[in-house]
Amino acid sequence: MPWNPQGGGQGPWGSGPSGSAPQPPDIEEMLRRGQERFKSIMPGGGGSGRGLALIGVAAVALWLSSGFYEVGPKELGVEMVFGKMKSTEPPGLNYNWPAPIGLTLKPQVTSINEINVGFQPSAPGKRGQVLRTIPEESLMLTGDENIIDIQFTVFWKIDTRLPEKGGSRDNLEGVRNFLFNIRNPEMTVKNAAESAMREIIGKGEFESSRTKGRGQIAIEFKKLIQEILDRYGAGIEVTDVQIANVNPPAAVIDAFRDVQVARADMERKVNEADAYRNEKVQQAQGDAAQITLRAEAYKQQKIEISNGEAKRFLSVYEQYRQEKDITRRRLYLETMKEVMLGMDKVLIDNADGGPGVMPYLPLDGLTRDRAAAAPAKTGGTSK
């Protein structure tokens, strides 16, 4: 449709009168000149069947040559034909049908990826510095109904393990699942990690989770998250788990420290009480052993004395059987000797015409006086 200027005398490009403004390019002229140049290049003018065949062969050769591809050291070439995974190729130069028949994907199967749960990673150049915690991810409920703040990192990579039942390196099931079963691998790993950790923490106790049970938690967590990802068919292998922090919530950290101090004081008092108890128990055991030994010695002494007296009585009885009068007299005299030995004695003669009280020399008294005077004399000499 020709241009019909309306008022103002402007051309179709918004300029002034058509005679004074630049004209638009002539598309038809440009196409005609391009065809003429192409015919001049091709042998026979390009219009013959031989020229068209050469053009077709060159185009096919160029299309086939586009099927060569290179796989990097950390990559794995996944060849697809008509949308179906055909095989996997190692690093190096490989070939596959070019598009649209074939397609080659090159996932990085040896790269270790990491997902942080409960916190954001450290900033570049500030290693070890946590930028921000994420309480909605890190706060979890323990089995004894306490809240714990746990932060951890999951390291994972594309699963290149051979299936337990069959399978080959040419068609790895884990790589196929990773490429076609999940849409967002990072979010899948993070959700599975948070779910697995909440389940494990919910079975344990607060104090055990933050002290001696951390190693066991990491082992159980790695096993459980791998089972979850395998059930999903995610094609992901968990290589390692690192638990960064296991603490009470920040809102109660001061109260928790007070509780820890009180618990330490309690343990100290308990230890002191145990030490005092052990000391007293050992002392009592020593006294009991000493008393027992003395009792045993006293018992043995009495047994020996009783045995001696019994033998003596039997000996005296044997003599008594042989000479009753003599033995009776001897026993009487020995008994009277023991009775009268420590007494003051007065002899009285009751016979008719007797003198009554009989004078006698107290030899035993003299002996006692001499024995008592000997220590006094010794003491006076020492002065």
Image (spheres, rainbow, N blue to C red):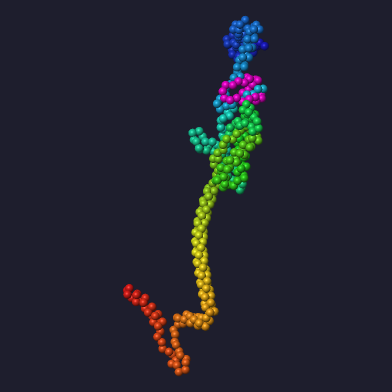
Q: Is residue 97 within the magenta segment?
A: yes
| Up-down relation of residue 170 to residue 366 (above or below) | above
Our reading of the magenta stretch's main secondary structure is strand
Q: Position of residue 335 (x, y in %)?
A: 49, 80
- Give the image quarter of residue 133: top right
Q: Which quarter shows the C terminus?
A: bottom left
Q: Position of residue 132 (x, y in %)?
A: 54, 38
Q: Is residue 6 within the magenta segment?
A: no
- Give the image quarter of residue 175: top right
Asked whether the viewer can see residue 133, the reply is no
Q: Which quarter shows the N terminus?
A: top right
The residue most toward the bottom is 353
Looking at the image, which is closer to me, 137 or 74?
A: 74
Residue drawn at 56 percent across, 23 percent down: 92
Q: Which residues are magenta?
A: 83-105
| Up-down relation of residue 82 to residue 255 (above or below) | above
In this rendering, would 277 be left or right of 226?
A: left
Looking at the image, which is closer to me, 137 or 109?
A: 109
Q: Position of residue 278 (x, y in %)?
A: 51, 58
Residue drawn at 64 percent across, 7 percent down: 50
